[in-house]
Image (cartoon, grey):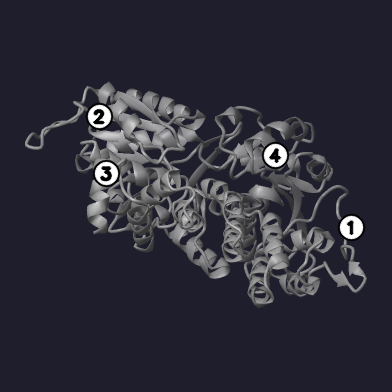
Amino acid sequence: MVDEFDALLLRNPSYVKGSDELYYLGIAAFNLHRNNLALRALLEFQHRFARDVRTPEVILATVKVYRRLGRDNLALDLLRQIAYLTARSDLLLRAREERADILAGRGEYLESLSVLDEAYRKAEPRERERLLTRIRELLTVMPPETIRRSVFTGNYAFPREEARLIYEERLPAGSHWRIEEKGFGEKMGEPALEGVLPLPGAYRPPALLPAEGLSLRKVGVIIPSEGRLEAYGVDVRRGIDLFLRSLSGKKYPYRIETVYASEKGDDDSIAALMAAEDVLVIIGPLLSSTVERIMPLAEKRNLAIFSPTASSSRLNGISPNFFRNGLTLEETSRGLADFAVTTLGLSRFAIFAPDDVYGFHYGDVLRKEVTARGGEIVVSGSYDTTLTDFSRPIKALKAAAGIPARLPDDEEYELPFDALFLPANAEEAGMIIPQLVFHDIDVSRLAILGGSGLNTPRFPEVGEKYAEGVFFADGFFAASPRPETQSFVARFREEYGEEPGTFSAQAYDAAAIVAELFQSGAATRSEVLAALGEVRDFPGVAGQTTMIPGGLTAKKPFFGTVARGRLVSVAAGK
């Protein structure tokens, strides 16, 4: 029955149905994880039967579908409607818990805690113990410094002792932070640099400290410490920390100490870090905009800025003091175009990209790179990323390519292109590809190629059979068979219980490159700066890297595809 409704909706999305039909279809598809069908039915129910008593429940189901598809912003927008549609305490509680989960998943821990605390404050006594368990779980993943600076100073309803106990458990053995009975104590041991915030992971774990008497080498790290970007900062910190732990037990001749500064609106902590003469190099910042702001000061201080994450092409040639080991969009596109033409032997391409700055730039770079290799861009189209029904932009793409609106069932039509560049995220691609099929674009006869947005296990989940055989390029791929990569992935998984992402891998490599420079004799800022520009063919976990002063790299992306529902590696080259 669900399949019959699915076919009916694909043929005629506005088919008239009663509220019961739509409700049971949406819930059934939701329970079967038929996400695209569930989304169509549930959204149509909300549109047509907004005053139905079941609408709040339908909204909560839609929120879960959006979360499966990675569209958290849309989920949050829907959750705001619940309070206006129902006074039922159980539904309001479920909505608050969903919102808290989304915020925590985005690294917005304090916002998530505030929502859970509101739920705790308003919950019935029988629900409070369960909510307290969820609060404890959140505190166990929240960076200790965030707990220290914010949780104890906030006006929360849950017992503050819970935060205190978890904070003390989270501190590493031998840590120089302590909680005193009268409140939070001051930092113990050596005084911090003025204006420099000690972030999560800025401690000096005992495992990272070789025997006394070794020469000290200080490395500054600039990452976000709070807000929506904090999770990305944690990824960078994890990569750096994992590399430093790998030095334990090895005959490494120096003691490396990391000093962290917060990447935030004002740059006081960054300026203080850069002013410290014993800091020899900076790993970071996360954002390209921060790099642009701090480069004049870096040049004045004769300090190398080595970002594992900043990818904007605006940074190309910005300063001889700037380095990075991540791929820019141009480098990824160049690699993808070369893979398509050289490895796959393709020559005629279509581009279907988001109608935003990213999509326009990606399409422009692909056009240049394909043309330079003798290929041809036959047609380009764009789509609104807020859509779930892509009929209109797909029809426009077909019209621009000269493809008839409707093809007879008994005719085999040869498309004017043999490959489609689709620089979409996993959720968008998971909806677009089936709709291409519905509109007579036979994807089984096309090579579909995307970027880093498809390098996630979520893609084969949401794309189902339509994800099979789709190619993608990215700066790191955890399933790569490279020995360096597999060793790193295994150690990361053992340490943190999950697979590493691109930021962790590139931060690991940045720390490894800096450590190698120290070992080769670089002992001053000038020597590190000069040595970074001489790095050639470094065998990193995120690929072989050659550093070029001015923010350029000579590095190739990883390539992958989907086979039998799994992401697998693909080798480039004939």
What residue did someone put label 1 on?
191
- Callout 1 secondary element: loop
- Callout 4 secondary element: strand
- Mark pair 3, 4: CA separation: 55 Å
Residue type at tag 4: Ala
What residue did someone put label 2 on?
347
- Mark pair 2, 4: CA separation: 42 Å
Q: Residue at x 22, y 54 (%)?
A: 4
Taking the image as shown, residue 141 lies to the left or right of residue 167, namely left
- Mark pair 1, 4: CA separation: 25 Å
Q: Earlier in the sequence, mark 1 or mark 2?
A: 1
- Residue 355, percent across and down? 45, 29
- Callout 2 secondary element: loop
Could you tell me which quadrant the C terminus lies in?
A: top left
Tag 2–tag 4 contact (CB < 8 Å): no
Residue type at tag 1: Pro
Could you tell me which quadrant the N terminus lies in?
A: bottom left
- Label 1 neighbour load within 10 Å: few <14, some 14-19, many 20+: few
Q: Is residue 22 visible?
A: yes
Q: Which numbered disc, 3 or 2, marks the residue closer to the eye?
A: 3
Which residue occupies the foreground of this view, 331 or 287? Answer: 287
Which residue occupies the foreground of this view, 436 or 207? Answer: 436
- Residue 191, percent across and down? 89, 58
Q: Earlier in the sequence, mark 2 or mark 4?
A: 4
What residue did someone put label 3 on?
10
